[in-house]
Image (cartoon, rainbow, N blue to C red):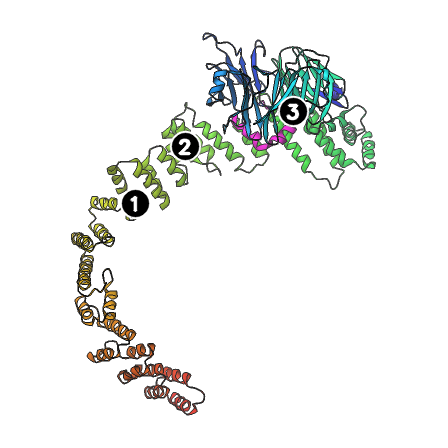
Amino acid sequence: MAFVTASWNPLGDAFYRKTELYEMSWPLRDGLRDSLVAAAPYGGPIAILREPQRRSPSSRPHLDIYSASGLSLASFVWKSGTVVQLGWTVSDELLCVQEDGKVLIYDLFGSFKRHFSLGQEVSQSQVLEAKVFHSPYGSGVAIVTGCGRFTLTTNIDDLKLRRLPEVPGLQGAPCCWAVLTQDRQTKVLLSNGPDLYVLDNTSCTAVSPPGLSPEAGSILQMSVSFSYKYLALFTQTGLVWTGTSNLQAKLCEVDTKMRSAPKQMVWCRRPRAQQPSVVLMWERLLLVAGQCSDTIQFPLDSVSVLVPELDGVRVLSGSHQELLQEVPLVSQEIFKIASMSPGALLLEAHREYEKLSQRADEYLREIKEQCVLAEAVRQCVEAAGHEWDCVTQKALLRAASFGKCFLSDFSPEPFVTICRELRVLNAVRESSVGLPLTHTQFKQMTVQVLIDRLVHRRLYPLAIEVCRYLKIPEFQGVSRVLRHWAECKVQQTDLSDEAVARTVCAKVGDSPGVSYSHIAAKAYESGRPELAIKLLEFEARSGEQVPLLLKMKRSQLALSKAVESGDTDLVFTVVSFLKNEMNRGDFFMTLRNQPLALSLYRQFCKVEESQTLKDLLNQDDDHDGLGNFYVSAAFKEPRLDGRLASLQNAVDEYNKAKNDFNAKATEEEMKLLKFQRKLDEEKGAGLQGLSLQDTMEALLNLGLYKHAEQLCRDFRVPDKRFWWLKLRALAEKHDWDELDKFSRSKKSPIGYLPFVEVCVKNHNQNEAKKYLVKVSPEQRVKACLLLGDLEGAADAAIERRNEAELGAVLGRCPASNRQLMDRLQRAAAKK
């Protein structure tokens, strides 16, 4: 604590510090010399390709992948083409850009994933230089070829190659170049001697940095800030020009007194920084240039590499790794010598309190008198997040805890949050993990991304502990980690299928959000189909089991699972798949063992494939089903002969099935069709295809009464039904004479009230009165009411002394007919 400021170096109004992150544990004999090095931002992994230009078959380059602390993750001999550039994607995948224009992609552990090509033209002219960059669209690659043409893609996962316009006078690679992302468009900024150009999709534009001295000479090096907002240029006279990346404004210009081009130049600018600064590196010198004329210089003992970060620069050497960054303003206010800021006073008060000194009270009184105790607590909490040393973190947090005890309305949430986050950060910063994240980077990348990084490194126990400690919902936290763990576990070949399945089930259990079908799919992709089947047994959702089983060619098992689920849509999906994959005989045999599936397929065939349905029924000797099939087919026949033939086939099948009822009904249908054909030929009646009742109605309407009676006798139609049909037909035709003749033909089986009703309905009251005398006493009241004969209805009701009928007539009597109402009331009273 006493030496917090010992490593601070002033530059203008700000201070810069170098914090040692790790003593690297990798076994590099020659350090980073003669190697291609790529380190991912946000404390990501490091890839080193040693002596990339060696092409002798007996001595190939060696590619190593390490964690940020130097722990080996992968190591293998490079057997492909000459590598021009290494780089990391946003998801920690290694891109290896080759001289022939191919880009090979590996994961953290050196497993090859895929490759893509930057085009035939690039392959022919060779890649001279390449850069891997990150844009809003994803991870991209930009290259310059031997003929001086630029090609780039902004997203390697959605490959769309763009060939940029030619640069005037450019032969080969430019002096220096950089990729810019502005207004959702990716551009290339390049220097060709003293000239500066911007390349976009359609044009090459010459530009000039505002305020750059004319004597500056050629631009030898350039760098774009982490956020793509700022640009730095190094000229051959040793000037460093900084400004906005759109070249609209200049920030400053610093003379470094160096004439040779630096090996690297990167930005060192943190969010809410006091000043922009650029870090330049030569063989043995590290130089920080800001807004003032002064610079900070650090000697280098060995070959180093600069890794730009969101809030600083990582300096990577063969033995150590350090973080160079601007000291945050809040840390300056607390730790600066003789500082009287609220945070500094609170920290001093707590020190004195631990010494049991009364001076603690004096400091507290001073803070309270200025009414800045809440600000003091806030400063200590914020400063703790920016510190790497655990002792300093604890001192600041204890001071904050001490101060908030004297505040009644102070929210504890920021304090609790920073304590939790620092505990997580300190855990992942351990050299055994190797994620040197600052608090600023952690807030930018979010907890979910941190967990993903731990999962990708297969640090599953730590990832689960982080999820539980930060109380992340199980679906987004622990379950997600367990799913990745299980997918990794099934790819291990040192355990038997049974052992792996038991281990996965015991560990995963019924965790929400974990799909055993996804784990089984990963096992199948890894060449372990039996393990996949065992894992699918733990999947509760049949809809997830079946697709994978079909993919694995386990069709009968898939059909059984679908049937067990009771989901008819799923069963039909499997049946449709099997129909396309299996030969006809095997397909039918498979369905025979699954009645539900067979039934569904029959339903489908009824609509879509009638011939297949017939084959199925024949195979099963289902004569009843075949009879039904022929009946359905009959009514699709346009010609009568074909219909009769199909119906005859149906009769034969019903007889084989000993289904006498269906056979008799089908024979009668054939008889009706023949009867209709005969009348159509003789009378042109147009009866073809009508039902029995519709046929009789048509005959009655046509006046073919004898033919209708004949049809009634032939098909044993009940008398009541025929009388109703003829009665309505004659009344609708107003054939009253025939109706009268019909009523006297024999005693009506339906009574004579219907005669009254149809006459009244067809507006013939006089005709209706003819039948009133024939109406039975039980129906006479209703008949009189239909005719409006209230006197007759009253006489009939009084004669029968039926209370309901008396009430009905009384309800229809007008109030003016007092005499009739009195008669009805007296009759009702006697009843």
The reply, left or right, for residue 100 in relation to residue 802 is right
Q: Amino acid at mark 3?
A: Ser
Q: Amino acid at mark 2?
A: Ala
The Cα atoms of the two marked residues, 3 and 1, are separated by: 65 Å
10 Å neighbourhood of mark 2: few (<14), some, or many (≥20)?
many
Q: Main secondary structure of the magenta part?
A: helix
- Mark 2, secondary structure of its residue: helix
Residue at the disc numbered 1:
601
Residue at the disc numbered 3:
225
Q: Are marks 3 and 2 in contact (CB under 8 Å)?
A: no
* 129, 194: nearer the viewer: 194
Q: Nearer the viewer, mark 3 or mark 2?
A: 3
Name the spot of residue 492 as percent of width and height, x first: 43, 24
The reply, left or right, for residue 664 in relation to residue 240 is left
Instruction: Tell me where the magenta segment starts and ends, as one range.
Output: 433-458
Residue at the disc numbered 2:
520
Name the spot of residue 466 as percent of width and height, x first: 57, 31
Q: Which mark is residue 452?
A: none
Q: Nearer the viewer, mark 3 or mark 1?
A: 3
Quadrant for the N terminus in the image: top right
- Mark 3, secondary structure of its residue: loop
Q: Earlier in the sequence, mark 3 or mark 2?
A: 3
Name the spot of residue 316 as percent of width and height, x first: 62, 16
10 Å neighbourhood of mark 3: few (<14), some, or many (≥20)?
many
The Cα atoms of the two marked residues, 2 and 1, are separated by: 29 Å
* 337, 289: nearer the viewer: 289
